[in-house]
């Protein structure tokens, strides 16, 4: 019954985990994705979707181009006769397909798309200016320039990146003058009208793009904040439950052991009860310390020093604690890792190393926090950890999880040193 209940509770979590992993794999992200990486992935997906739309637009243009080449009157109007016209057509088709094949690449996709778009604009200017009669500012293809401005603004919403389609109009006007075509007042009005439409398109699309990107960044940031808030709320809830449940049970055990101690007459029994009471008191102190760390009001340096002092009083081990650097507030997971490594190191010094003295140094540098624990015990060979001893393995796993570094330096008869270092990530 319990196994079925546990399985039913874990199935939704597994489904959610599978969906998250599928999205991360599709976007080529890791489980520890940052807000910046998520925003960059979203921008890349948006660019790829728009670049694919550009490919389908090109296919429509190429279809119309094939129709122009097939109709003699149209091909004659644009001067597209002879084999060179078909060579140019198939060149456009090839670079359009090549662009489609590389658009998923984060860098090459953008560069190839931009270069091929510039080629499209160049070919469009040639087709607009080429007819001797009805060409230039009179060409029916002049409206194509507005479409290219829109495409550039959608794919590359930066002022300098949109220059090629904007330059198409003055270049067309200059070609008209070079070809000895007189620019009439109506054509001048057409030029001004198209320039105004271009600036309107650029302003609207760039403005909307910036608003969309800013809104997405804000949503990603809020999602990160909500995630952190949920973690903090869950941590506080667990702290309350542990305090009210396990804490109350340990307190009851201490009270009952005191009551039984007063009733007991045999000295051996009284000694066992005292040991039981001491263990319960140590457990409740450890519980309180863990709860303080979970609630993020734990002062790391003072907590480590207090623990070293308590450990010295309980075991008689000569422990010297030193702290250097400017102390700062760290993430609860980092504080917990430092505390657990100190616990494990001191415990090993008593149980296995039979040390007489231990030096503990906590150092805060500009971008890292370092904990060094050195004892004068009998030492050991770190490459030959006895079977069933998982202390060093647990410490290494903690360091790896937080992106830190753990170095254990020891040899038989020379004591041992545990050095734990990790980046200072402020809470």
Image (cartoon, rainbow, N blue to C red):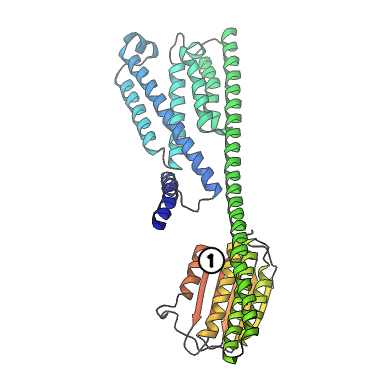
In the image, residue 80 sits, relative to residue 365, either above or below, namely: above
Res. 424 in view: no
Farthest bottom residue? 267
Instruction: Assign a secondary structure to mark 1.
Output: loop
Name the quadrant containing residue 241. bottom right
Picture quarter with the N terminus: bottom left
In the image, residue 366 sits, relative to residue 45, either above or below, namely: below
Q: Give coordinates of residue 238: x percent, y percent.
A: 58, 59
Residue at the (57%, 91%) spot, across then down = 268
Residue at the (51%, 67%) spot, across then down = 398
Name the quadrant containing residue 247. bottom right
The residue lying toward the viewer, choosing from 361 and 319, is 319
In the image, residue 152 sits, relative to residue 376, either above or below, namely: above
Residue at the (35%, 19%) spot, across then down = 63
Res. 119 in view: yes
The residue lying toward the viewer, choosing from 312 and 384, is 312
Picture quarter with the C terminus: bottom right
The residue lying toward the viewer, choosing from 198 and 239, is 239
Q: Give coordinates of residue 396: x percent, y percent.
A: 48, 70
Q: Give coordinates of residue 234: x percent, y percent.
A: 58, 55
Residue holding disc 1: 404
Q: Give coordinates of residue 358: x percent, y percent.
A: 60, 84
In the image, residue 101 sits, relative to residue 368, either above or below, namely: above
Name the quadrant containing residue 202. top right
The residue lying toward the viewer, choosing from 376 and 176, is 376
For residue 216, side relative to residue 128 (left or right):
right
């Amino acid at each position: 019954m319990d196994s079925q209940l546990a399985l039913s509770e874990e199935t939704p979590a597994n489904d959610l985990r599978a969906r998250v992993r599928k999205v991360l794999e599709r976007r080529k992200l890791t489980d520890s994705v940052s807000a910046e990486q998520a925003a960059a992935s979203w921008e890349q997906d948006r660019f790829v979707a728009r670049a694919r739309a550009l490919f389908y637009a090109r296919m429509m243009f190429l279809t119309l181009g094939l129709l122009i080449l097939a109709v003699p009157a149209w091909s004659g109007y644009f001067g597209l006769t002879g084999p060179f016209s078909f060579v140019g057509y198939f060149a456009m088709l090839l670079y359009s397909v090549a662009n489609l094949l590389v658009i998923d690449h984060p860098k090459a996709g953008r560069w190839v798309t931009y270069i091929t778009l510039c080629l499209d604009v160049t070919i469009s200017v040639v087709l607009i200016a080429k007819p001797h009669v009805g060409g230039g500012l009179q060409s029916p293809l002049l409206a194509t320039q507005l479409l290219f401005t829109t495409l550039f603004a959608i794919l590359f919403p930066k002022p300098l990146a949109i220059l090629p389609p904007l330059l198409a109009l003055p270049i067309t006007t200059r070609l008209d003058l070079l070809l000895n075509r007189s620019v009439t007042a109506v054509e001048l009005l057409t030029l001004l009208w198209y320039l105004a439409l271009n600036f309107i398109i650029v302003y609207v699309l760039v403005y909307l793009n910036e608003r969309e990107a800013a809104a997405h960044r804000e949503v990603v940031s809020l999602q990160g904040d909500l995630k952190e808030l949920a973690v903090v709320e869950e941590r506080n809830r667990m702290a309350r439950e542990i305090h009210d449940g396990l804490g109350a049970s340990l307190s009851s055990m201490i009270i009952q052991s005191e009551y039984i101690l007063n009733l007991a007459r045999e000295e051996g029994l009284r000694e066992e009860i005292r040991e039981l009471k001491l263990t319960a008191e140590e457990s409740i102190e450890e519980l309180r310390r863990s709860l303080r760390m979970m609630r993020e009001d734990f002062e790391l340096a003072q907590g480590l020093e207090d623990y070293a002092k308590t450990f010295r009083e309980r075991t008689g081990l000569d422990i010297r604690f030193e702290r250097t650097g400017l102390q700062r507030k760290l993430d609860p997971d980092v504080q917990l890792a430092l505390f657990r490594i100190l616990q494990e190191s001191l415990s090993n010094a008593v149980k296995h190393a039979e040390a007489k003295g231990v030096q503990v140094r906590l150092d805060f540098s500009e971008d890292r926090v370092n904990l060094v624990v050195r004892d004068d015990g009998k030492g050991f060979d770190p490459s030959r950890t006895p079977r069933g001893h998982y202390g060093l393995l647990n410490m290494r796993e903690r360091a790896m999880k937080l992106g830190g570094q753990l170095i254990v330096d020891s040899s038989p008869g020379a004591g041992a040193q545990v050095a734990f270092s990790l980046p200072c990530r402020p809470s």
